[in-house]
Image (cartoon, rainbow, N blue to C red):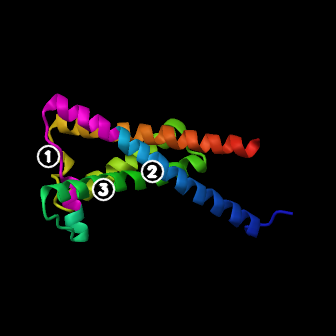
Amino acid sequence: MRTDKPTTEDTTTTAARVAGAIGKGIVAGLIGTAVMTVAQMIEMQLSGRESSDTPYQAAKKVFGVKAEDEESKEMVNNLMHFTYGTAWGIPRALLAEFGSRGAAGTATHFGAVWGAALLMLPSLDLSEPITEWEPEAVGKDALLHGIYAIATGLAADALTSKADKDKEA
């Protein structure tokens, strides 16, 4: 008989689902970050834009990291970029695990990821508010974050669907 209170079995099942989603999210976030990085590299080659050191500057402000040379600065920059992107895969996989897959999950994830960046970077004095950006910069930033969200979403949904099929077998 079902009561309003969750049972130990319900709690254990939910905890297992969350743990599994965290693992899938790490993988999905890493894939999404790699795809976004390739897209950024292509965009930089086409536009002639230099690589951004914003991830390094964020690490410096938030964690007090100070690189001793350009090689160390680049290493911290890449580490922060991949850590941040990988970590954002976790909420996307949680969305997939608990029923928000496909376009709905990806749109929700995109809004959270891009919205967080648009709020966080100006608050750290690492960028101007989006209202002061040129339209082309807004478009490029939205496109790159969209590429990340789509790649992460495809990976999270595929990993979750595979796990669902494995459970059924």
Q: Is residue 52 left or right of residue 32?
A: left
Q: Give me the disc on residue 8.
A: none
Give the residue at x 34% y 52%.
82
Quarter of the figure with residue 42: top left
Residue under label 1: 132
Question: Residue 128 in magenta?
Answer: no
Give the residue at x 49% y 36%.
103
Residue under label 3: 79
Tag 1: residue type? Answer: Glu
Q: Are marks 3 and 1 in contact (CB under 8 Å)?
A: no
For the residues carrying marks 3 and 1, which lies nearer the camera in this image? 3
Q: Is residue 42 visible?
A: yes
* Circle 2 SS class: helix
Residue situated in front as seen by the camera: 137 or 50: 50
For the residues carrying marks 2 and 1, which lies nearer the camera in this image? 2
Residue span colored magenta: 36-58
Vertical comparison of 17 with 12: above or below: above
Give the position of the N terminus as an image quadrant: bottom right
Tag 3: residue type? Answer: Leu
Looking at marks 3 and 1 on the same chain, the residue that comes earlier in the sequence is marked by: 3
Q: CA distance from mark 2 to mark 3?
A: 16 Å
Residue 59 spot, x, y in % from top left: 24, 63
Q: Is residue 20 left or right of residue 143?
A: right
* Circle 1 SS class: helix
Quarter of the figure with residue 152: top left
